[in-house]
Amino acid sequence: MQKSPLQIARQNYQPKMPVALQGGVRLVEGEKTHSVADQEEIKKLFPNTYGMPLITMEPTQEKNHCAEPFNVGVILSGGQAPGGHNVISGLYDGLKSLNPNNKLYGFLGGPSGLIDGKYQELTGDIIDEYRNTGGFDIIGSGRTKLEETWQFDNGIEICKKLGIKAVVIIGGDDSNTNACVLAEYYLQKQCGIQVIGCPKTIDGDLKNEMIETSFGFDTACKTYAELIGNIQRDANSAKKYWHFIRLMGRSASHIALECALQSQPNICLISEEVEAKKMTLNDIVEDIVKVIVNRANAGLNFGTILIPEGLIEFIPAMRVLIQELNDMLAANEEFVSLDGDDAKREYVKSKLSPASCELFRSLPKGIAKQLTLDRDPHGNVMVSQIETEKLLIEMVQKRLAVLKANGEYKGKFAALNHFFGYEGRCAMPSNFDADYCYSVGVTATHLIAAGKTGYMSLVRNLTKPAAEWLAGGVPITMMMNMEKRNGKMKPVIQKALVELDGAPFKYLQEHRAKWASPDTNYIYPGPIQYYGPSEVCDQPTRTLLLERAGK
Ligand code: FBP
């Protein structure tokens, strides 16, 4: 296979590691834990894995060694995130250093690989091909939900067949919730199979008191910020377009916020703020229009607007509509059997409450249809398919036309829409993600060797140089609360949304008037750098730096 010079160079990159993981490792148990909310219910649902202690890893003189070889299975779950291959290489190297006869199996195509018994042994040659690369193509990923006991039982069979002592699930909040359910089930069954989770998602919404960031967020944001910076240079050169840029991230606005901190656009919408202020679509449009008119008055008919992909779900009336649609689609097979868009539209309208029906009717047909598309296996609306940026352009255009007719706007409005998501999910991992992921993988092997289950591999202190990072394990039950999914209350890992009293949002709040003004405040971040001075190559995200400042 042909490779670029950078691909070849990256294959030989040796991830930086915390001192705690460089030699022998000793596990130290800390305080017992409890879930973030709904303690009694979570405790009842997870009698075996609830309340386990936090674990920290300390360096020792003695090298770790497991006399009896053992095998581990790994699953990549959900959307791609840069660094997944390094978690697997860290796991592989960790296992081999414990005993060269240990084996690593990859389950193919996501969680379904465990259920259907599709696997591949990951040998040294295979691992070497994928070190420090983006993508999940080493074994593939999938969104099958691991939640039924027959699936868990199939897992036991295949693990027994392959001599697998532990399954490592690399996934986001929903996949790690499932990892916890699986760990609990395997303990109840006393089948001797451990389950360890690893925090993955570009969305950045799997974070909490213990997990400082999920992997992939760093690389994805830096990739999008580069593209936004390039667009801003173009806008500032051509001076003729408003760019409406939607950014992936599902519900949370972390990606949009981080990209704003890196590139300083004229406007960055934050879904969580829209919800807190109970804003309507018209309010949002009005805010955008004000900035456009103000810049037009100074002769500037161009700019950039960042839009989080989950925005629509945070507009209170829209949220009610989406919830009604979710419940309707979950409990209704009749809808799927209907033929044609018009029949479906009429059917939906007949099932909605009067207020939601009114809102549904007022939406452009394309957007309304996008809202009724299939949900993901976790019952979530697939916000990546809803073109909010086009909806906003249309509404802004209409409003500006009214202002123009009234003589209140004299500018020219030409808009271009963009959606950045898939461009960043498989980018070559930044040094941060390459280092972080490798350590997460090595940490997981130590948790497995110590017989732990129901834990998430933990690497923290991430704004310090990698040598000073801390490793350990956090019980997954600690992150859980009860939420409504597919119409039913379920135990799930609490999603981290943007905190409006958090330092990253406050920074945006303090600076956005200046960024919206006719002065040029754009930053052009440029591409991710892998080689060169540390301040250029090893910087974590602005979000992480601001959140950790003073801690
Ligand atoms: P995960 O939560 O699985 O990490 O997925 C992240 C994500 O990229 C979201 O930002 C986006 O909404 C979604 O996946 C898109 O899903 P798909 O890959 O199925 O199109």
Image (spheres, rainbow, N blue to C red):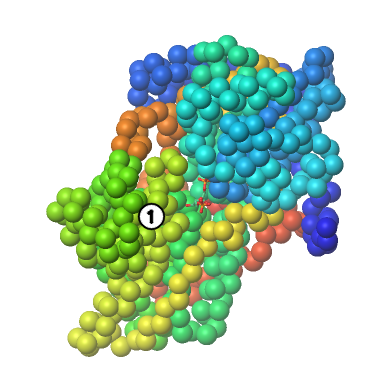
Q: Quadrant of residue 37?
A: top left
Of 276 and 52, nearer the camera is 52
Of 476 and 538, nearer the camera is 476
Name the spot of residue 38 as percent of width and height, x first.
35, 24
The residue under label 1 is 373
Residue 190 shows in the view: yes
Quarter of the picture containing the N terminus is: bottom right
Residue 58 shows in the view: no
Q: Which amino acid does label 1 sit on?
A: Leu
Q: Is residue 246 left or right of residue 402?
A: right
Q: In this view, does 519 lie to the left or right of 190?
A: left
- Picture layout, residue 82 above or below residue 4: above
Q: In this view, does 354 lie to the left or right of 446?
A: left
Name the spot of residue 374 as percent of width and height, x first.
40, 51
Q: Measuring 69% from the left and 35% from the top, which residue is drawn there? A: 119
Q: Measuring 32% from the left and 59% from the top, which residue is drawn there? A: 339
Of 65 and 276, nearer the camera is 65
| Mark 1 closeness class: few <14, some 14–19, many ≥20 residues within 10 Å | some
- Picture layout, residue 474 above or below residue 526: above
Of 483 and 486, nearer the camera is 486
- Picture layout, residue 408 above or below residue 465: below
Q: Circle 1 — which element?
A: loop
Q: Measuring 81% from the left and 36% from the top, which residue is drawn there? A: 123
Q: Is residue 139 left or right of residue 270?
A: right
